[in-house]
Image (cartoon, coloured by chain):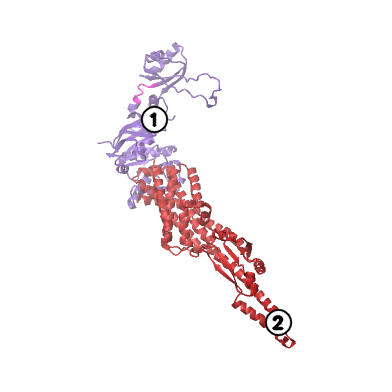
Chain colours: A red, B purple
Amino acid sequence: MSALSVAFKDIQIFLKDRGALFQLFLLPLVFIVAYSAVTASFETEEQDQRIPLPVVDLDGGREAKTLLDGLDRAGGVQVELIDEKDATQMLEENEIARLLTIPEDFTEGISEGRTVTLRLVSHPDASLEKTEAVRLVVEGVAQDMALESQILASLQQMGEMQANAPPEYQEAFAVEKIVAQAQSQFDRSQDRPLVTIEQTVPGQESEKEELPSTAEVAVPGFTVLFVFLTAQATARSFYDEKKIGSFRRLMAAPISKASLLAGKVVPNFITALIQTAIIFAFGAFGLSLLGFTPVKLGNDPVALVIAVLLIALCSSALGVVIAALARTESQIGGLSTLILWGLGTLGGSIIPYFILENMLGPIPMALPHYWANRALDDIMVRGMMLADVSLALIMLLGFTLVFFLVGLWRFDFD
Amino acid sequence: MPPILEVDNLVKKYGDFEAVKGINFEVEEGEVFGLLGPNGAGKTQTISMLTGVIQPTSGTARIAGHDIRTEMNEAKKINGLVPQDLALYPTLSARANLNFFGRIYGLSGKDLKERVEDVLRIVALTERADEAVEKYSGGMKRRVNIAAGLLHHPKLLFLDEPTVGVDPQSRNHIFESVMRLNRERGMSIVYTSHYMEEVELLCKRVAIIDEGKIIALDTIKDLIALLGGGVIHVGLERVDDALLARLSALPGVEIAVLIPQPVPPPPAEEEGPEVKEREPVTATPIVKIVAENSQKAVVSVISFLNEQDITLTSLEILEPNLESVFLHLTGKKLRE
């Protein structure tokens, strides 16, 4: 009862603080829109550029050169010749997203009119859309090339036959006959293409990982960042209570320390939940009004609710730790900035954690923000279920318990 | 009737620093008891221990028989604290503040509403109760601060420097409220202050506290009686034991003693090995003369000094009040 009274009072105070209301509820939306807009413009610029296409040319012949020139002229892809020895390793290490291999017998096969196969291999993490675009370009150029080659060969053959034929047979080489022959070659090239493409993805058992859209990155990331930023409000609330002296009055009242702490933590918890609801609602409905792709909330609402509750609880517990460590207002500001923005940045709230993992290795895993981001990303972006995100949720629970214990241990009630 | 508060050798230490050095006193039921001492004397620390804000290092106290070490929760229901700080939430109204503190003491519903109205009446703020506290004057804030300590009808109220920073009108109102609570509701009050006028006005018995120790505890009348027929401070150019003995033997004088004067520290900018040796700084000696009769003693002391051709540098006749008692007992002024 006393804890609820403390919580109710803190919420009353919070509702009168317009600056805090803006910071907690509107600022995240501003960040999401700004981030989505900026990164979307980068994406647009990227789409305007040609997709790099590393090629291993095992043939080196005339037809291979014609194919490479054709790819270059076609636009959409930028051909980069690389050595066969490096190619496999580069693909495995995701240094290149896809690789086109021209077989040794390419020129010979085309010349002899038999089917040859180009091999297009893509990394499991490569964008499916881009790979498909590359395939279409290669296929188009190869088909044109084969068609040209077949029709030319056909016409050449007819020319030779006409030159050697007696005058009474010249009628057989009338224009309509030549056109019919060309049409026949064209139909044949459609039914039995000279060049085919074999498209493979090594380690296909590992699901292809689509990169999320900017909004899909921004909404969970900034939710985690701003929910944890509420920890600063908790710490400041403790400080203000001590500063104005009401903490002494509360300590002199028949209220237990546990109730007092719980009462101070509950408003942060409620604030974090409201904040999350607002951000999610904005992500799901508001972003589309501004012309951005709306985010999905995943396939498991129970998992999402549990994740949100744990993130809010973890943030509240972190607030107690900051309140316990900081003695002055400036220390609260400094510590909060350092801890909350630092953890947010390193934990994948601003730069997606799957990129940070490549840069920092396992370091982000030591941070609560990492597990919070991972839980939300897995649920919302990848559509995972409760069982799939249990590790992230357990880690968040662990951080929450540790923060509460450290906070209680270090908190100065005197 | 047993005392409502019995303090038994209470000690508070912070590392090596002893803020409260084993104090003992009792407060009778219905009494207004004064704790008088300069800032930093240990008054707030003592009250903080008695109200459960901080834990004593050793010793204990009983509030209406409840030991504060083992039954603090029971003791907290009996006592009330009006802290020195304005322990109020500035953006909330006086009524919202009082509702909150009432709920903390377990009040609710009609009972809470009536108590809030009651304390607002006591501090005469009913009409402005719905304004945010931050819009109040210092005196009004102090009155709400007191009201918050009265909500649960405490039998023993600790008022810690309740008039700091208030205008004379609000101060008088606070005095009236304290006296009325004591007179009409029989509330026992422990009143701490470094203003001796307030303590003299409100309290019958006073403990004078300095450097964490109670150096005198009695009724105001008996404390002032410590000054005897009066106390005179005489500044002289030079003093020795023979002179003090002759002053003590003068008519109207009970005893003459030298008040130890602190030697002023050397100026910081002169410190350092390269600084030239300077003249030693000595304070003018002050002799305290406890008189059997202050008028007679002044005449005989001045005559004697004239006869002996000793230059008088200062002369101060202390008024018979608690300030003089404190000066008499410690050699310091209350507001130093």
Q: Is residue B64 visible?
A: no
Q: Is residue B293 left or right of residue A78?
A: left
Give the residues in magenta.
Answer: B224-231
Indicate the position of residue B119 as horizontal and vertical percent values.
Answer: 36, 45
* Observer-nearest of A160 and B119: A160
Local SS, label 1: loop
- Placement of A57 over or under B329, stated as above or below: below
Indicate the position of residue A70 as horizontal and vertical percent values.
Answer: 66, 68
Q: Is residue A273 left or right of residue B221?
A: right
Q: Quadrant of the C terminus of chain A?
A: top left
State how many labels appear.
2
Label 1, label 2: how many angstroms apart (C-alpha)? 126 Å
Crowd rating for badge 1 (residues with CA inside 10 Å; few <14, some 14–19, many 20+): some
* Observer-nearest of A373 and B176: A373
Local SS, label 2: helix
Residue at far bottom of view:
A168
* Observer-nearest of B273 and A375: A375
* Observer-nearest of B8 and B245: B8
Q: Is residue B27 left or right of residue A33?
A: left
Q: Is residue A172 visible?
A: yes
Residue at far top of view:
B307
Residue B211 shows which numbered tag? 1
- Placement of A376 over or under B16, stated as above or below: below
The residue pinned by badge 2 equals A161
